[in-house]
Amino acid sequence: ASPQPLDEERGAVELIDVARYFGSTAAVDGISLRVHPGEFLSLLGPSGCGKTTTLRLLAGFEQPDRGQIMISGQPVAGVPPHKRDINTVFQAYALFPHMTVAENVAYGLRQRSTPRAQVGVRVSDALDMVRMTAMADRKPQQLSGGQQQRVALARALVNRPSVLLLDEPLGALDRKLREEMQVELKLLQSELKTTFVFVTHDQEEALAMSDRVAVMLDGRIEQIADPFAIYEHPETAFVAGFLGRQNFFYGTVADKGRTIRGDGVVLRAAASTDGIPDGSSVMGAVRPEAITMRAGESTSAVNSVAGALVSVAHLGDTVQHIIRVGENQTVLVRTRRTDSVPRERGTSVVCQWPESSVRIFDAAQAKMAE
Ligand code: ATP
């Protein structure tokens, strides 16, 4: 029999310097990470950064070339997938087409020879959880995509794993349904207090759902933090550019890392930037929503540029403006729909932003998001 997990560690997931190589590709290149019991953690990153491989290592479909994995406080090296206190939901729901919804959900329990009397209760609990009780007797092809996804979820939750791994589970749904399912899934997770490790390449989804987000690039974790911190205080240029939109300005740093002298613009940050010597090539990042805009021909102030409004796009709750500055720079400005700012294309405008919105990164070390 496998050892009983310690109660306070139940649902904890830990990776210690885990690596997985495929030939010369470092799919996972030395990841250390602890997911707390009951936490909703997202692995976010561009295609090929190693998200799925990380999940497969946790699930036991893949073995690490280096490092250690602990689930619920126990090392899992050599433990096969079905013996781990973990279940996986994939994007392709993989429901059995010839079985009803209830039979699909019961399948995992039958595999583990759960007593018949218990199966019925557990299945109806699981269907209840995902609000699919009324459709228990339908076949998968009689369900919508969102309903099929819920059944897949019920099937993964029916044997009450301490940890659920979800690999782009909402990827196949259209935008509106996807947003509804995000809310449902988040609520369900906080009720069950099951640890969720959720893979997505959609930054809005990761921000909306997670307690913490781990941003991955090239098999490594760039930053792990809660959604507010990761959006407001990105530690690398890649993270700054991957989550949300950003304006990047290039120049040379001065004033103990506080000022950037660029081509036609001077940026000043609220605090000095540690570890970047004056004279280095740097980039300053400013969020489009941190910039205010008014009609005007020119500016000599710091944290300010003048240009021509070339595009106005209505995004629903916000309006996005593109300002052409000089020969080859554009600045993105997002305002609220109700703000009174110039909306006429061709208008000369002055853009301005506060010191607190300026983040400075070493340009030489920067890996950039596309
Ligand atoms: P996506 O968002 O596209 O699914 P991902 O972040 O999940 O990407 P992985 O699927 O983990 O990325 O792949 C990471 C890297 O490892 C990629 O370069 C991929 O080509 C490579 N890789 C993954 N699995 C294998 C395999 N079985 N054999 C060879 N290379 C692999």
Image: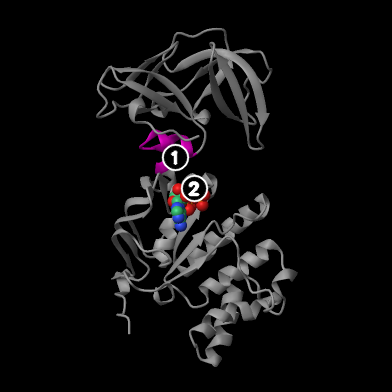
What's the residue type where badge 1 is placed? Answer: Tyr
How far across and how far down the image is residue 70, in percent?
A: 31, 66
- Some atom of ligand 1 lies within 8 Å of the CB belonging to the residue at label 1: no
Task: Answer few, some or many: residues within 10 Å of disc 2's Cα (few below 14, many 20 plus, some between 14 and 19).
Answer: many
- Residues drawn in magenta: 229-243
Q: Which mark is residue 207?
A: 2
Q: Secondary structure at mark 2?
A: helix
Discs 2, 1 touching: Cβ within 8 Å: yes
User: Which residue sits at x=57%, y=10%?
Assistant: 296
What's the residue type where badge 2 is placed? Answer: Leu
Q: Residue 207 vs residue 172: left or right? A: left
Of callouts 2 and 1, which one flags the residue occurring earlier in the amino acid sequence?
A: 2
Q: Residue 188 vs residue 240: left or right? A: right
User: Which residue sits at x=64%, y=18%?
Assistant: 310
CA–CA distance between discs 2 and 1? 8 Å
Residue 22, visible in the rendered structure: yes
Q: Which mark is residue 231?
A: 1
Q: Is residue 25 above or below residue 76?
A: above
Q: Is residue 66 above or below residue 311?
A: below
359 or 143, which lies in front? Answer: 143
